[in-house]
C-alpha cells in the first residue's frame, strides 16, 4: 500500500491519507482549518490479501467517521460528545441494515419463495436498486451536493498527483473526477458480489438468511476491495477498464465537478499528507 494516496470528502472539506499520515482540511469562511492524525505502523500480516481489505476498511470507516464529526464541529462551533457520536453511528448502522438488508429481503418474499435461487437473485437486485435510489435521493440535498463537489475535488487532486503533475488548481481542473480506487466503486462491487454469494450461500430459514447477509459483509467487502485494487492497478487495460464500468457509472451519482476553492482545500490536505 506504500505510495498510494486517497481520502474522502467531509463537511466543507477533504480528508487525505498518505501512508500513516491522515490530514483533514475544511474551509470556514476565509480560513482553512487543519486536523492531523498519525496512524500506528501496520503489522506485516496486514499486507496479506483479503485480511488487509478487512483491516483497511474497518480502519478507514472509523477514521472517516471521526474526521466527518470533526468537520461538523468546525462548522457548528460545538463539540460532539463521544456518546452522541456513538448513538448516531449505532442508529445509522441500524437504519442501513434495515434499508439495505431487511427491506429488500421482505420485498423479495412478494415475488418468490426463499427456498429458490430466484428469490436470492431478486433480493440482490432489490438491494442494488435500493442502493442506487438512495444515492440519487441524497444527491438532491444541497448539503450532500456540496460534499459530492468536495468528493470531486479529492479525486482531481489525487489524479493530479498520480499523473506526476505539479499540484496546482489549474492542473487539477484538467483531471477527471473518476478514480478507480473510490469507495463508491467499492460499494457497488460489494452489492454485485453479494448477489452471487447469497444466491449460493442460502438456507431455508429466513432469519439465518438475514444473518448471513450481515455477518458475511466484511468478507464480501474484502473480496470487493481486492477486485477494486486489481482494477486500479491495470485500469489502462481495455478489458479491465470495461470491468470498472459499474464503478464509473456509480461515481456519477456521488461526484460533482468542484469549484476552484474546493480544489484548494483538497490540495491543502494532500500537500500536508504528503
Image (spheres, grey):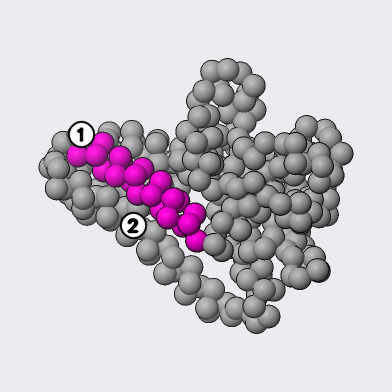
Q: Tell me the magenta residue range.
A: 119-141
Which picture quadrant has residue 248?
top right
Of the image marks 2 and 1, the number of the one nearer the N terminus: 2
Which label number is shown at residue 67? none
The percent position of residue 187, horizontal first and vertical second, equals 48, 44
Q: Is residue 197 left or right of residue 44?
A: left
> Mark 1 sits on what residue?
117
Select label 2 or label 1 by which is in front. Answer: 2
Q: Residue at x 66, y 54 (%)?
A: 150
Q: Is residue 202 left or right of residue 257?
A: left
The percent position of residue 213, horizontal first and vertical second, equals 33, 48
Q: Nearer the viewer, residue 166 or 30?
A: 30
The percent position of residue 142, horizontal first and vertical second, equals 54, 62
Image height check: is 187 above or below 27?
Answer: above
Q: Residue at x 87, y 39 (%)?
A: 166
Determine crowd level at label 2: few under 14, some 14-19, many 20+ residues with C-alpha closer than 10 A. Answer: some
> Mark 2 sits on what residue?
99
Q: Quadrant of the N terminus?
A: top right
Which picture quadrant has residue 26?
bottom right
Task: Tell me the chief SS of the magenta region.
Answer: helix
> Does the segment drawn in magenta span residue 132?
yes
Amino acid at each position: 500500500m506504500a505510495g498510494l494516496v486517497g481520502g474522502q470528502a467531509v463537511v466543507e472539506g477533504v480528508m487525505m491519507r498518505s501512508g500513516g499520515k491522515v490530514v483533514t482540511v475544511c474551509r470556514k469562511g476565509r480560513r482553512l482549518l487543519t486536523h492531523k492524525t498519525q496512524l500506528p505502523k501496520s503489522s506485516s500480516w496486514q499486507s496479506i490479501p483479503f485480511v488487509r481489505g478487512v483491516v483497511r476498511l474497518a480502519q478507514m470507516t472509523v477514521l472517516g467517521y471521526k474526521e466527518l464529526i470533526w468537520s461538523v464541529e468546525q462548522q457548528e462551533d460545538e463539540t460532539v460528545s463521544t456518546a452522541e457520536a456513538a448513538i448516531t453511528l449505532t442508529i445509522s448502522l441500524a437504519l442501513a441494515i434495515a434499508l439495505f438488508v431487511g427491506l429488500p429481503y421482505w420485498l423479495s418474499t412478494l415475488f418468490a419463495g426463499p427456498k429458490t435461487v430466484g428469490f436470492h437473485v431478486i433480493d440482490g437486485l432489490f438491494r442494488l436498486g435500493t442502493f442506487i435510489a438512495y444515492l440519487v435521493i441524497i444527491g438532491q440535498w444541497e448539503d450532500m451536493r456540496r460534499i459530492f463537489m468536495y468528493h470531486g475535488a479529492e479525486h482531481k487532486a489525487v489524479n493530479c498527483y498520480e499523473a506526476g503533475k505539479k499540484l496546482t488548481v489549474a492542473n487539477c481542473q484538467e483531471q477527471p473526477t473518476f478514480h478507480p480506487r473510490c469507495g463508491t466503486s467499492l460499494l457497488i462491487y460489494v452489492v454485485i458480489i453479494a448477489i452471487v454469494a447469497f444466491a449460493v450461500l442460502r438456507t431455508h430459514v429466513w432469519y439465518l438468511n438475514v444473518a448471513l447477509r450481515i455477518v458475511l459483509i466484511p468478507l464480501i467487502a474484502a473480496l470487493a476491495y481486492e477486485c477494486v485494487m486489481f482494477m486500479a492497478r491495470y485500469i489502462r487495460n481495455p478489458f479491465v477498464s470495461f470491468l470498472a464500468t459499474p464503478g464509473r457509472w456509480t461515481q456519477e451519482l456521488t461526484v460533482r465537478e468542484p469549484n476552484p476553492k474546493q480544489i484548494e482545500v483538497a490540495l491543502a490536505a494532500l500537500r500536508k499528507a504528503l
